Image (cartoon, rainbow, N blue to C red):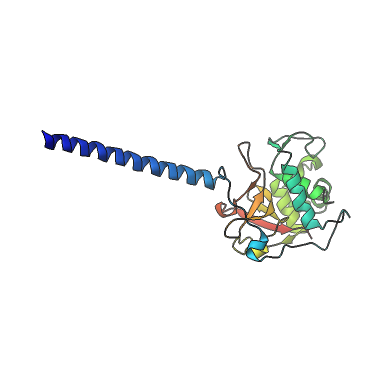
Amino acid sequence: MKLVTRKLFNGECMKKRITLIVFSVLIIVALYVLYCFNYIPHKKYTNADFNIEAYKSNIDKDNDGIDDQTDILNNANNYIKTNPKYKSKYYNTGYPDDEYGVCTDVVAFALKDAGYDLMVLVNEDIKNNKELYDIDAVDKNIDFRRVKNLKVYFDNNAISLTTDINEIEEWQGGDIVVFKKHIGIISDKRNRKGICFVIHHANPYQIYYEEDILEHRDDIIGHYRIS
């Protein structure tokens, strides 16, 4: 009788241990997934932590006393502080004039307040180089808010840089990164490896606008700096 009771007890203990192990593994996997998708904040480092000198442009397009590189970075941060809601809409004003926006608007507002009006500039480049753009009907109000058009525009009008994220010194806050169907501004914050965060707006469920995403993307197709 005692032997049977002991076996039953040991069996129950084993079941509890297995249940605890499985539960612990599920918790770890869930936390890892949440971390990878940036629902859990990542620790942020700066250029100084990696002995990287912050790049400063020698151009101040809007003559506000702030170089373009710093201006673009500051403007991107100012834009996301408004907590824009994600929604794709058409605006007769070109630039969204309400609380909504998409990924391209982060870039457009960052450059606009530094003296670069992408609505005008992209439209001019399309008119001058229409063969480079896959556009049937030109529409000034929306063309500059499409990733594929911005990719062509930056290829023509910006400095093209490395797309290798491990060349950490070549990535600086205020740069522009283009993915196959997405775009953002490079942050001056970095992860523990020195790889930059991205200031972007990707979907309606995004919690943070400045995220550690470059290591988890395999679709980087462009990295630019305004010249």
Task: Give left or right: position of 166 versus 131.
Answer: left
Residue 225: which quarter of the image? Answer: bottom right
Residue at horizontal 69 percent and vertical 62 percent from the top = 161
Residue at horizontal 33 percent and vertical 38 percent from the top = 19
Above-or-below relation of 28 to 87: below
Coordinates of residue 219 in the picture (x, y in percent): 59, 53
Task: Give left or right: position of 128 versus 14.
Answer: right
Coordinates of residue 82 in the picture (x, y in percent): 74, 39
Quadrant holding the N terminus:
top left
Q: Visible in this render: residue 77?
A: yes
Above-or-below relation of 67 to 14: below
Coordinates of residue 227 in the picture (x, y in percent): 79, 60
Task: Give left or right: position of 71 versus 50.
Answer: right
Coordinates of residue 164 in the picture (x, y in percent): 61, 62
Residue at horizontal 77 percent and vertical 56 percent from the top = 70
The answer to which of 5 and 85 lies nearer the viewer is 5
Task: Give left or right: position of 5 versus 178.
Answer: left
Q: Visible in this render: residue 105?
A: no
